[in-house]
Image (spheres, coloured by chain):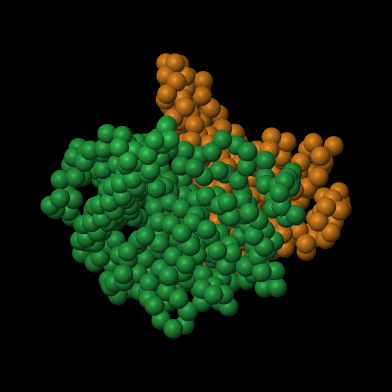
Chain colours: A orange, B green
Amino acid sequence: MATRALLSSKTLARVVRANAASHSRGLHAYTLPDLDYDYGALEPAISGEIMQLHHQKHHQTYITNYNKALEQLQNAVSKADSPAVVKLQSAIKFNGGGHINHSIFWKNLAPVREGGGEPPKGSLGWAIDTHFGSFEALIQKVNAEGAALQGSGWVWLGLDKDLNRLVVETTANQDPLVTKGPNLVPLLGIDVWEHAYYLQYKNVRPDYLKNIWKVINWKYASEVYEKESS
Amino acid sequence: MNLLSPSTAASTYLSPSAFLPRHLHGFSSATLKFSNKLWRSRKQNTLNLNTERKPPRCGFNIGNNVEIDLLLEKRVIEKMLMKLSRCKRKAGWNKINAKLELKPPPYPLNALEPILSQETLEYHWGKHHKTYVDNLNRQIDGTDLDEKSLEDIVVISYNKGDILPAFNNAAQACMLVIAWNHDFFWESMKPGGGGKPSGDLLKLIERDFGSFERFLDKFKAAASTQFGSGWAWLAYKESRLDVGNAVNPLQSDEDKKLVVVKTPNAVNPLVWNYYHPLLTIDVWEHAYFIDYQNKRTDYISVFMDKLVSWEAVSSRFEQTKALILQREVENERKREEEEKLKSGEATAEIYSDSDVDLDAE
């Protein structure tokens, strides 16, 4: 069962142990972040089975492979093996991107009883109305882009820091939002890989996109927005 | 940032990534949003789509009208159509009076148990594949292409290189390819499959990969490292150099070889000229999620061990060889004709540099 991600002595001990293990090589080993809610807490929008598989299998695999790739990269760099360094880039992009994206994704979700699905108020709510016309228009746009995305990828609500405006973007595979622009900050990301919804929604991605809004954690998105838009 | 393409009246949007260097196989990573306005032909003329019609709408995995984002270049789409029009698959596309039909796999849906469950096939064929064919039907509904077989549609639309406006929507080409890929996929498997090929195909595998085991390793690696959705293929590559398909000046039989390639999303190696697919495995998550969840490598191993229909692969191999031979003979013939023409012209162009009539002498 997922535990609360408070800075308890257990969490602290785990962090220290992880760091100690990699400290000898000077390499930080990434670990699977805990969810702030139980696997079954997002039902019926997202089933507990999907959440468990998604978190414990998919995300964990990305982290494992990311750590492996980084270690190989460190070896290659120290041996000045340029071909190996270049060859590892796609694995790092894919697995590292997967880790980044999913870490954001878990924070983007919250059970209904903890505020999941409540539309944003404050500056983010106002910004959405300004840039998209209305909250419903934003949802429609994100759903349209998400449904039209071919294959695997993510659909994002991001903040363009330079222009100080909100954007809806899609990225392919596990590319993080920065690959679409270095000044883009992700506020909200929705995973539209098939593994994110297949067991429950099968091939009907639009239904998944319609229902996920009920468990979106706008509080987190607002926090990030307020921090980055100042 | 939205950039307006300079020669269109309005709505063709290119993202900044359109100007990035192209991928090895000729795809740019631009995303083109298609509107119902303009589509440039190969000869750079603007063609007006029939604007009275509703904009062509199609999407993957959806039932409603949504514009589709495609990661395909126009050039790639043209090649796809050209290749598919040459592909002589008789049983593939049913010619019936009404719409295109969804062709079932050549075995019952539970025949691949326990490797691929009936549930998987029911969803993969019954929902995904069916959606692609339905979308394609919806695309061609009401156009001239209605009530023709898929192969005819491809041939007519390609129109010897001058793509018809009726096939203006790259989404149609995409649906076509993805439906074709799935047919190809079902026929690449059979209950009780696996094992090794025999005869010429095995010899060629051993020549081009070293051994059958090394081919297996290479194929499995390609399928596992196709990040995201896509396909892995065993294809027969004609005698072409590896750089931009340049013509090989010193052609030999050794240059015709088997290769393992991987493609993303809906791409088919047919579009890269001179590749002939023989075998494919679908590594979109929907192909294995129900049975293997995230363990793609297990799915690939068991596919190669127990599902591959080497008979199908061998027969495609024979067909490909025959096709290539036929094309070579035709090319020879054309070349000879051209030479004759040239030598004929040469005599006509000799001018006498005096007024004397040669015949009178």
* Closer-to-camera residue (B266/A185): B266
Q: Position of residue B197 (x, y in %)?
A: 17, 53
Residue at the image position 38 percent from the left and 69 percent from the top: B121
Q: Position of residue B85 (x, y in %)?
A: 40, 62
Please state if A156 lies on the left or on the right of B302 as rendered: right
**Residue most toward the bottom?**
B97
Q: How many marks?
A: 0
| Residue A48 against residue B97 in the figure, above or below | above
Residue at the image position 67 percent from the left and 45 percent from the top: B15
Indicate the quadrant where residue A192 lies. bottom right
| Residue B354 against residue B88 in the figure, above or below | above
Q: Position of residue B338 (x, y in %)?
A: 34, 47
Please indicate, yes or no, whether residue B355 appears anywhere in the rendered image.
Answer: yes
| Residue A56 against residue A67 in the figure, above or below | below
Please state if A153 lies on the left or on the right of B242 as rendered: right
**Residue most toward the left?**
B199
